[in-house]
Image (spheres, helix red, strand yellow):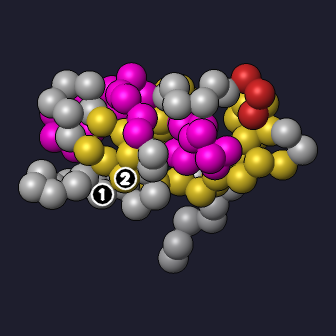
Amino acid sequence: MEASKEKIKIIKLEDLPKQIGKEIHVNGASIALFHLTSGEVHAVGSKCPHAGGPLAEGIVSGEFVFCPLHNRKISLLTGEVQAPDDGCVTTYETEVIDGYVHITV
């Protein structure tokens, strides 16, 4: 049986700076939230699968974040670490409703 998912209001979009990650904690999960220059908002697990680096502190480029510890490139769309490295982080569905970012967990 699949656990039910819940949409949770997180933050006002205007309070989430573009290109700077923000670590949040929702229902016991540590999540890195990113507001891209395109206006899209993406959320992934906050720890790099390689060595647990804090992804919210990474450099954002396009739809990728670079882990601040060892420069692993991680897709904010799929959560996949780009070759030649490997690994994956959880991705979370986000939606902006009435100016607020919501995340589904």
Residue 14 located within the stretch drawn in magenta: no
Residue at point 52%, 72% (across, down): 2
Q: Position of residue 61 (x, y in %)?
A: 41, 39
Splitting the image into 4 quarters, where does residue 10 fall?
Answer: top right
Residue at point 15%, 57% (across, down): 83
Q: Is residue 42 visible?
A: yes
- Marks 1/2 in contact by CB < 8 Å: the verdict is yes
Pointer 2 residue: 75
> Which element carries disc 1, helix, strand or loop?
loop
Tell me, for residue 80, which label it has, or none.
1
**Label 1 – label 2 distance at C-alpha:** 5 Å
- In the displayed image of the protein, which residue is found farthest to the right? 98
Nearer-the-camera pick, 17 or 79: 17
Q: Is residue 8 visible?
A: no
Q: How would you rate the neighbour count of disc 1 (Cα within 10 Å): few for under 14, some for 14-19, many for 20 or more?
A: some
Q: Earlier in the sequence, mark 1 or mark 2?
A: 2
Residue 19 is left or right of residue 101, and the answer is left
Q: How would you rate the neighbour count of disc 2 (Cα within 10 Å): few for under 14, some for 14-19, many for 20 or more?
A: many
Look at the image and give the residue range highlighted in magenta.
33-61
Residue at point 60%, 30% (across, down): 18
Residue 8 is left or right of residue 91, and the answer is right
Nearer-the-camera pick, 89 or 71: 71
Q: Position of residue 4 (x, y in %)?
A: 63, 64
Nearer-the-camera pick, 70 or 7: 70
- In the displayed image of the protein, which residue is found farthest to the bottom? 1
Q: Position of residue 74 (x, y in %)?
A: 31, 47
The amino acid on which the numbered mark 1 sits, given as a three-letter code, is Glu
